[in-house]
Amino acid sequence: MSKTIKKIAVMTSGGDAPGMNAAIRSVARTCAYYNIECAGIYRGYEGMIEGDFKELTARNVKGIINKGGTILKSARSKEFQTKEGRQKAYDALKAANIDALVVIGGDGTFTGALIFNQEFNFPVMGIPGTIDNDIFGTSHTLGYDTALNTVVEVIDKIRDTASSHNRLFFVEVMGRDVGHIALNVGVGAGAEEILIPEEDLGLDRLLESLRRSKLSGKSSSIVVVAEGDKIGKNVFELKDYVEENMTEYEVRVSVLGHMQRGGSPSCFDRVLASRMGVKAVESLLEGNSNYMVGLLSDKIQLTPLEQAVKGKSKINQELLRVSDIMTT
């Protein structure tokens, strides 16, 4: 274990995700286990520039493992995007005797950490926290499993209404660049069709699929749409198109929005956060830097931060095939 690292800071940045608090707790308690200090940085990179730090101990992180969001808050920082802003952040960390940094967030957070490391050779370790699951180097990001459970529960409720009124519901879920949430909840909730950015179904095929469902005796349907799907300009345009071409359907749209980010983290996310926090601190103490901690083949492993930022997570092709069969 490194003798040069005596104090580690942890921060959250970007969109919040269930499990971030569990990761903060894990970092703080792992630091306590190895008798090193831990500081929490409030409001991400903005707080780092301003020196908004607070001591974290094994005791003052109690009672947060079950809470969604992040106790350290999150904020965007335009100033950190400048060399001058990053210099202020470095000076603030050194003034507080902080020797290494654990950042919890997505690719934007990791890009900032990567540049910061390159400029100041400051030890950094990343923990992926985003419900979109769009980070290369891990099969699961923090918050993804919780978001899936939240969305499936909501779609189950929507189906009750759809069945009662013979309606077609378009349910838009998060996923600007990837369709992990849409694909998984679509299969899990028994959706009649799933629209994701990776697969351009096309308007004609969508209508054909819905007509097949109607002919097979289905009086109501659920179509799960990732927000980044390329078929229409937006989910409301899809609604209008279907209404024009399938007058037998009464069409409704439900945009789930930020409710997908909230809520108490699932057991899976709590355990994953605990494992990732331990690995992040121990990796720094072993002299590693510029890596992201990830879950690969159910093992916690390190991926170079640059690969995590530049790599692209891939949609599960086997699950795509399953969804095609299930929507028959």
Image (cartoon, rainbow, N blue to C red):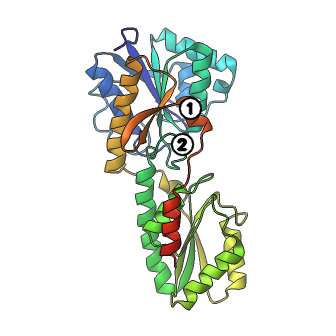
* Res. 211 image quadrant: bottom right
**Distance between the alpha carbons at the discs numbered 1 and 2:** 10 Å
- Structural crowding at the residue carrying mark 1, measured as other residues with C-alpha within 10 Å and reported as few (<14), some (14–19) or many (≥20): many
Residue at 52% in and 67% down: 321
Q: Secondary structure at mark 2?
A: loop
Q: Left or right of 285: which side holds 209?
A: right
Observer-side mark, 1 or 2, equals: 2
Find out whether the residues at labels 1 and 2 contact each other: C-beta distance under 8 Å. yes
**Circle 1 sits on which residue?**
110
Position of residue 249 relative to residue 279, above or below, is below
**Circle 2 sits on which residue?**
135
Q: Position of residue 303 (x, y in %)?
A: 49, 32
* Res. 273 image quadrant: top left
Residue at 37% in and 48% down: 265
Q: Position of residue 270 (x, y in %)?
A: 33, 43
Q: Position of residue 189 (x, y in %)?
A: 44, 69
Residue at 56% in and 32% down: 110
Amino acid, disc 1: Phe
Position of residue 154 relative to residue 279, above or below, is below
Position of residue 278 relative to residue 70, above or below, is above
